[in-house]
Image: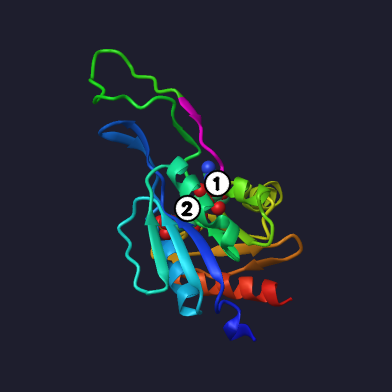
Amino acid sequence: NQDTTFKGKTVLITAGPTYEAIDPVRFIGNHSSGKMGFSLAEEAAKRGAKVILVSGPSSQQTHSQNIELHKVTSAKEMLDKVFQFYDNVDIAIASAAVADYAPKEVAKEKIKKNDDNLTIELVKNPDILKTMGEKKTHQFLVGFALETQNEEENAKGKLEKKNLDMIVLNSLRDTGAGFKNDTNKVRIFTKTERKEFELKSKDDVAKDILNFVEYQLLK
Ligand code: PMT
């Protein structure tokens, strides 16, 4: 029964950006508002799931009692928080825009301006979703792909490389899609399927994504 697929299930969702500190006043971040992830969390909760929402800095708020919100700042903190819960979740959806790189060292004091240029060495952050894919046992794993070129090829590459069951592609080439907007336009892929959706509110995109998850779990 479609309506009960999420009842009693635990769903882990990552949302928002991560901030990687440069010094006590500056960071490397991105434009993610958290809207897409928070919409997914509300929709999963509405369908009867227990939701664990791990979010980077965001001004979004939760409304449902069934959502447990864990706020983090950096990718490393997000990784640690995700793996406190991962073993015991049924479905995981990674909608966070995690910084791929972080400053090698965080300056203890505010970096002072001088006459020279400034070089900051960046080191690779852990790939949270890829790690989830490597440690997957029973979880149904959904990733996102945010692309600006060769979108479908890149999304399918991520589906494969990160050992996902499903991937949601949004392209910055589509007007109204991606960061900050209240709307998004997505294409969903599994290893064998492709489905394209119209531009719609992030709340409605969340419904489409969870309907697709339900359909996969019921197959
Ligand atoms: O928050 P909003 O303003 O509503 O915007 C929504 C969104 C555009 C952020 C969202 O829809 C989205 O596309 N999220 C994924 C953004 C992203 O980082 O995509 P990516 O193609 O770089 O990463 C691929 C996947 O790996 C993503 O599921 C990402 O969460 C995950 N990842 C990436 C890097 C990393 N170090 N760890 C990860 O877990």
Q: Residues within 10 Å of mark 1 (few under 14, many from 20)?
A: many
* Image x and y of residue 183, in percent: 43, 66
Name the one closer to the observer, 158 or 11: 11
In the rendered view of the protein, which quadrant contains the C terminus? bottom right
State which quadrant residue 113 falls in: top left
- For residue 109, above or below residue 196: above
Read off the magenta span.
Answer: 122-127
The answer to whether residue 9 is visible is yes
Amino acid on which the number 1 mark rests in the picture:
Ile
How many discs mark residues in the rendered view?
2
Tell me what residue is drawn at x 58 percent, y 83 percent.
4
Q: Callout 2: helix, strand or loop?
A: loop
Tell me what residue is drawn at x 65 percent, y 86 percent.
1
Name the one closer to the observer, 48 or 211: 48
Q: Callout 1: helix, strand or loop?
A: helix
Q: Say whether marks 2 and 1 touch (CB < 8 Å).
A: yes
The answer to whether residue 126 is magenta is: yes
Amino acid on which the number 2 mark rests in the picture:
Ala
- Please state if 51 lies on the left or on the right of 31 as rendered: right
Q: Which residue is mark 2?
A: 96
- Ligand 1 within 8 angstroms of badge 2 C-beta: yes
Closer to the chain start, of discs 2 and 1, is 2
The answer to whether residue 135 is magenta is: no
Tell me what residue is drawn at x 70 percent, y 62 percent.
190
Residue 128 marker? 1
Q: Residues within 10 Å of mark 2 (few under 14, many from 20)?
A: many
Tell me what residue is drawn at x 23 percent, y 20 percent.
112
